[in-house]
Image (cartoon, coloured by chain):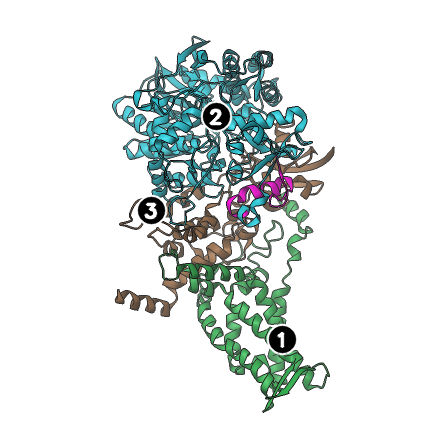
Amino acid sequence: MSGKYDYTTLKTDVLIIGAGGAGLRAAIAATEAGCSVIVASKSLLGKAHTVMAEGGIAASLGNVDPQDNWQVHFRDTYVEGVFLGNWRMVELLAKEAPDRVYELERYGALFDRTPEGKIMQRPFGAHTYRRLCYVGDKTGLELIRTLQDKVAHSEAKILDEFVVTKIVSVNGKVAGAFGISMREGTFKLIECKSLIVASGGLGRLFKVTSNSWEGTGDGLALSYRAGAVLMDMEMVQFHPTGMVWPPAVRGILVTEGVRGEGGMLYNKDGERFMLRYSPKKKELDARDVVARSIYREIIEGRGTEHGGVYLDIRHRGAKYIMEKLPSMYMQYKEFAEIDITKEKMEVAPTVHYHMGGIRVNPETQMTNVEGLFAAGEAASGLHGANRLGGNSLTDLLVFGKLAGVSASAYAKQGKQIKFDESVVKEEIDRVMSFVENPGATNPYPLIDTLRESMSKYVGILRNDSDLNKAYDAIKSLKPKLKDIGVRGSLRFNPGLLACLEFTNLIQSAELLVRGAIERKESRGAHFRSDFPNRSHDFRKNILFKLNEGRDEMSFAAVPELPDHLKDLGKEED
Amino acid sequence: MQEVKIRIRRSEPAVSNEVRYQEFTVPVGEGMVVLDAVHYIQNNIDPTLSVRWNCKAARCGSCSAEIDGMPKLMCKTRMDTLGKEITINPIKAYPVVKDLVTDVSHNYEIAKKIPPFTPKEGLKEPWTMMQIDVTRSKEFRTCIECFLCQDVCHVIREHQSNYFGPKHVVKIAALDLHPLDSIDRSELLHHDGGLGYCDITKCCQNVCPEEIRITDNAIIPEKERIVDHAYDPIGLLIKKVKRRKW
Amino acid sequence: MEKNMDKSLTWFPPEFKELNWRLWSFAIILILSAGALILYPVSQFEGYVDPFYSPTVAVIPLIALFRLSCYAYRKDYYRHVFRHPIACLDGIRFDDNRKGYSGEMTFFSLQNFHRYFLYIAIVILPFFYYDIYVSMTYISGEFIFRLGTIILIANALLLTLWTFSCHAFRHLTGGHTDCYSCKTAGGAKKKFYNGQSYLNRYHEQFAFISLIVVLAVDLYIRALIVGWPIDFTLLKFAI
């Protein structure tokens, strides 16, 4: 029909990769600034992983607890991130959260209300006050629908079911992105003046995860190859409560809202063990603490037969549960045939979030590559070593907007960077090699091997020998990259996607494990049983940068708190 | 381990007109859902089998298909509720892209035609809304856009008309019932939206995985709103008299 | 190939379980009662007023129109008479694009006057309660409570439930409101709406059962006339 190197070219001011909360919020900001915008997304519009966010969005509105304010929100986020976060990002988050929530309401989101008619707020792990604005247990869905509606009625062009395979950068400046339109089965080049990566995390690097299909660390690997610095890659959050049984649904998230609404954790002996691990905050301690406690109970033989612990919300009564946690009720009813109003849930930790990611300038969200921006889970620096529940949705709105504003400002000044067509041809060759290689290896078993060893060796409790086993596994998988391939065309070819994703996964996995080996301390989500204490020497970020084909690791000290925040983020040890 | 035979409709209309049903044998484990079986086929038998999926937790509404003729989410349909032989078709109301993936972009075109949320003027910020006023709209906001209702609706599936379809009536009802919204979209639904084509046979309500009472709570109330301004002379009269009083 | 698929599914019966019995019994009841009313008119017997005559046989067409334009019955005959479609399941839908279809855009847009028949039904409804009173006091100076009265009570209650679980009623009393708290007594209004919505869930069932009971009352009275000894007195005293 046509030549191998056929592709179409689109031009735009701002290209956004990812149509989740951050990507859509950035699109709104960029179109409002008068830029032309293309939003490229691997999934169908409105299906992004943001829809899975359940509990709520953290903002110190003080509607329920009037004592709450941005300073407390700052302190909670910064301290629970174990002093690894970037203070400026945390400050922006805490200060702007209420505005972004009210703005979302003005866009048409419908939050649950207090008796006075204000936005209702529920308690959540390690938040001092009741701070999470919510819509039942479907806050993420409401957020994305609202933004989706806003974007649909704007000038932004949506390019969904489009897989970006390469971010083109020339001499440290971004020039565009290249990828496959899955629906059309064709290649497309998008030339842009600035580019925002809002592509989410890498949860699908692990076997037991709450993350959906997209979470393969694509944005991280693409930006990394385009020259961006990755940071804190070892910081992977385990959500304390994921489903356990039956095996087919292992890892599906059980919202923290269950504990927020009063759910209690028991081991198989009926002991409410959180009283032992965290007498003060109990079930609502930070996620790393609760996840580790559950994990300890399980490995020390006090777990259930399926390898979990019990989560009990029955005392709240059927009516309350159905009203506040309808999806949880449905989820257990459909998948496990358990009626949570009458029976206990079985839960165990599941990989949930990646605090690490692309290093950005906190004032603009720009990376070290000029014109390349990052926002949301793909970016790093905000959550430090541990993310608080509800802060991710806030993150999306606050930094999605910031990225959109700065990317459009950059695009207005900058001009389109030119580059040689050979870059595109090279990329076409790379992608086509996966479908033109008749004797190729099926990538799926390799991905399974990778995911299994990551889950086994890079879990909640890490140690040097396990991490090295994972590193060895990655090193032995890496040479197989050049042999993988599938049959078929470019049109909706899951095998081809698996090949592309495997390349990205293994890139992220390697950096993640190297970071974890290097961080010889325990901090937040990163817990080393051979170095169980926090070390002041490691209050720094581990950075990776690709330099002429080699991964270069370096350290950067965490920026010191300025005077006006010093008292809030005091380290007491 | 038990084995189940799965027949899947394979086609790629952009390349050829050929349509075939390919049969796969899949082992079934405990709690397995249809999507797991499709994944098994992808991973072990045929990596080119196309399927759209995201969350595998019945939250995103991507994996819609017709399982034994019934529109369902593959991730929410357990294998043990089905027989030993299963047939999976893509949703029929929309053109197939490849295998189980269909082109649902028409829905995004319709979404653009629906006026977005437009708040009343002069509201004091932050807004005050009462819980009793948000609950009705909330039911519709659980819509995961799986388009199963669109698929099962005979007006869309078997006939041609301008009817938006149940999913979009749900969206319109969600917006109309927002206590601070200032637009009545039932007029649009009456003219451009072709709601009159709906004959309330309630299939959409039957298949909704979020158990939204689409017909009873969205379509019929919107029909009644249309009656208010298009058919009911007494109602119109009362409205006019009332307006004069103000 | 595709046709074979459809055939292989036709034996699959879940949708057929939901037979059109409701619709067909309505049709049969309509024909039988029309025949009976014309050939063997029975308006009342020993204080029992036949519901078809309450208050007068002349309202029957209006009530029939109320039933015909009811959303529950509409669903039934659109599905089973016009087959648009019979069932939701692929393969047994019996609807296709060769069949003309205009939904409720042309002739059936008359359905939109359902609320007017509702108004009439609400006006007629008290007569059924009056009939209960009559059945207990038809002998002057005496109060009498019989089995037939219980049936009349059931009849009146079911008709009430059916009428007030109507979708049009739901719209008129609360459904048209977007903001309850903006109205006077909004809380009570919303509560009423919620209660009515609860009844509305069972509207289809009420629609059918109430019809059966109307017929049952008619047959009961006819049975008494031909002398079946089924009625008995529960309570009787002078007033």
Cα distance in 3D space between marks 1 and 3: 55 Å
Q: Is residue C51 left or right of residue C10?
A: left
- Do callouts 1 and 3 mark residues in contact (Cβ within 8 Å)? no
Q: Is residue B160 above or below residue A99?
A: below
The chain coloured green in the image: C
Q: Is residue A396 left or right of residue C44?
A: left
The chain coloured brown in the image: B
Residue position for label 2: A201
Mark 1 residue type: Leu
Q: Which subunit holds the residue at mark 2?
A: A
Q: Secondary structure at mark 2?
A: loop
Q: Position of residue A406 (x, y in %)?
A: 30, 26
Q: Secondary structure at mark 1?
A: helix
Cα distance in 3D space between marks 2 and 3: 34 Å
- Residue A363 seen by the camera: yes
- Do callouts 2 and 3 mark residues in contact (Cβ within 8 Å)? no
Mark 3 residue type: Trp
Quadrant in the picture for residue A273: top right
Label at residue B232: none
Instruction: Pick the residue in front: B36 or A272.
Output: A272
Residue position for label 3: B127
The chain coloured cyan in the image: A
Q: Position of residue B3 (x, y in %)?
A: 72, 35
Q: Which subunit holds the residue at mark 3?
A: B
Residue position for label 1: C215
Q: Rate crowding at label 1 as few (under 14), some (14 to 19) or many (20 or more) other CA atoms within 10 Å.
A: many
